[in-house]
Image (cartoon, helix red, strand yellow):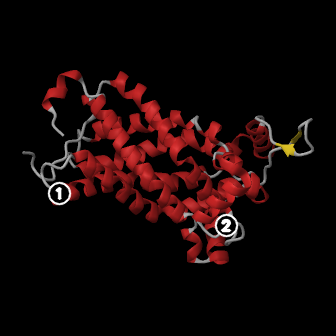
Amino acid sequence: MQQKGAIQIIEWEDLDKRKFYSLGVFMTLTTRVTVYPASVIRTRLQVQRGTALYSGAIDAFCKILRVEGVQGLYRGFMVNTFTLVSGQAYITTYELVRKYVSQYSPSNTVKSVVAGGAASLVAQTITVPIDVVSQQLMMQGQGEHLTRFKVKPKMVLTTTKHRPTFGQTRDITVQIFAADGFRGFYRGYVASLLTYIPNSALWWPFYHFYAEQLSLLAPSECPHLILQALAGPMAAATASTITNPMDVVRARVQVEGRSSVIKTFRQLLVEEGAWGMTKGLSARIISSLPTSVLIVVGYETLKRLSLRADLIESRHW
């Protein structure tokens, strides 16, 4: 019988790296396909003024689906798939930094905070340019009047309607570069770091903390994967609530082309008050709950499937 509260953590040196990376790409892509619509909804909610376009996450979902169809919920998805690279960079950095910090501190909390923050720094450096383009694409359709850049429609010979072509990513990319140069692709970089580094640094220690507490409450024979699947969304809700104000600022800086995080923050407070800081929080939490379950179950399963052959018999879950 295992000691209650003692959830074994598979460390970097325990993994078969070839299995880990090949299975990791599939896991990350599956997760993104599942939760991407919530990202579109969250972005539109955060950028709109007041409730001019949508009254909430459910209203946004229904309106987008009704007016733009399923395609509207996946605007910018293809370019967003390039974040698979940043996902692998995140995982690698987290595990390597965690291993490095363990040489100086045995505390799981310290290792989680430092590794989570470092992983987010690396990942955001890769992700921000992709986010800048994909968020502009997310806002096309009902939200295009809120953006500086718009997809150029092309005439279709068989109809009088204007339809955007598959060149929309190129259109947006060219417009961003023409307006702001290379710096335009890193607009909101500081805001992203201020959002996602704390979010990542908070999520991991909260995740391990909740998992340990649930293990103390659960029967000894309860599978640890179930406890971890519950701990993931609890940690996500906690971290999302704490970091949401900066996430709202980040979205506005990137979509509206603002240059100052502080000015954007102040203007948001003046125009919409403290309530404006909660914009998109419901969509963020709604998306983070299933996302966290998928990520935790997928990641912990991935690590178990990638465990070195010589360690399989010695581990019990």
Residue 54 vertical position relative to residue 207 in the rendered view, above or below: below
Nearest to the observer: residue 32 or residue 185? 32
Q: Tell me which residue sits at (65%, 47%) in the image.
A: 70
Question: Which numbered dot is residue 218?
Answer: 1
The disc at residue 54 is 2
For this rendering, which residue is in front, 182 or 3? 3
Q: Position of residue 171 (x, y in %)?
A: 79, 39
When the figure is inspected, residue 114 is found, relative to residue 28, above or below; the finding is below
Name the residue nearer the viewer: 239 or 32: 32
Identify the residue at horizontal 43%, vertical 35% (top origin).
27
Q: CA distance from mark 2 to mark 1?
A: 41 Å
In this rendering, position of residue 216 left or right of residue 149: left
The amino acid type of the residue labelled 2 equals: Tyr
Between 299 and 106, the one lying in front of the other is 299
Residue 221, given in percent of the width and then of the height, sits at: 13, 48
Query: In which quadrant is the N terminus drawn?
Result: top left
Element at label 2: loop
Q: In the figure, residue 212 lies in which quadrant? A: bottom left
Left or right: residue 6 compared with residue 290: left
Which of the 4 image quarters holds residue 61?
bottom right
The x, y position of residue 117, in whole percent, is 41, 48
Residue drawn 57% across the image and 63% down it: 280
Q: Residue at x 64, y 60 (%)?
A: 62
Vertical position of residue 131 compared to residue 13: above or below: below
Report helix, strand or loop for mark 1: loop
User: Going from the N terminus, do you reach mark 2 or mark 1 first?
Assistant: 2
Tell me the kind of residue under disc 1: Ala
Quarter placement of the C terminus: top left
